Amino acid sequence: MAFDVGTPINTALLLFILYSVQKIVFPSTSLPKEIPHEFRNGYSWLPKSHQPTVLFKTYTPKTLAPFHGKDNGRILLAINGIVFDVTAGRNFYGPRNFAGRDASKGMAKQSFDLDMLTPIDQPLDKLTDLQPDEIDNMKGWVEHFSNKYIVCGKLVENDVA
């Protein structure tokens, strides 16, 4: 089967290929007549604003509670003793019942009920009543959050920190 330039489709393809190769090998060198409006004041690779710096800290239920996301503040939540900054997911995580709280049991049981939350003035839930599949579910959430959000601390009992 030979290449026949006489057929119209082959001729069109050959011309397109030659045109494309010419554009790649000999690109246009003309300068734009006008500077793009976003670069008129110069170009900066810096973002318009920076997120506040997040330092790894030790939190207690009482010190975690103010990070509930109200008034556009940061949103932190804890799962299995690990504190995550979920402010980037503000539309989903806050301010709601898990914001600023230990969400371990709720994540393990896939429940947003308020009875999944331990009051902040009581000891942390030891999670001894969880079934093996619920523990696996909680570990899956820890892995998901670790890949998606910033780990910013650990959660300890109120009288430890």
Image: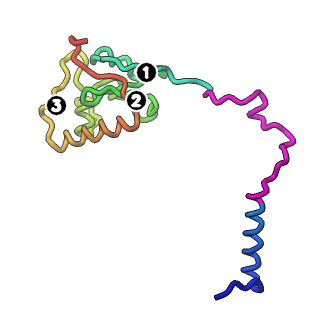
Tell whether position 31 is magenta: yes
Describe residue 39's horizontal placement relative to residue 47 as left or right.
Answer: right
Describe residue 44's horizontal placement relative to residue 109 as left or right.
Answer: right
Residue 127 marker: 3
Label 1 close to label 2 by CB (< 8 Å) = yes
Q: Nearer the viewer, mark 3 or mark 2?
A: 2
Describe residue 159's horizontal placement relative to residue 101 as left or right.
Answer: left
Residue located 75% across and 33% down the image: 39
Q: Amino acid at mark 2?
A: Ile
Residue 22 is situated, as x and y percent measured from the top left of the image, at: 78, 62
Q: Amino acid at mark 1?
A: Val
Residue 149 marker: none
Residue 155 is situated, as x and y percent measured from the top left of the image, at: 27, 21
Tell whether position 125 is magenta: no
Which image quarter is the N terminus in? bottom right
Residue 150 marker: 2
**In-front residue for pair 3/144:** 3
The segment highlighted magenta reads 23-47
Q: Single out the residue that lies furthest toward the right.
A: 33
Residue 101 is situated, as x and y percent measured from the top left of the image, at: 30, 24
Q: Nearer the viewer, mark 1 or mark 3?
A: 1
Label 1 close to label 3 by CB (< 8 Å) = no
**Above or below — where is 63 with respect to 19?**
above
**In-front residue for pair 102/34:** 34
Helix, strand or loop under label 3:
loop
Label 1, label 3: how many angstroms apart (C-alpha)? 28 Å
- The residue that disc 1 covers is 54
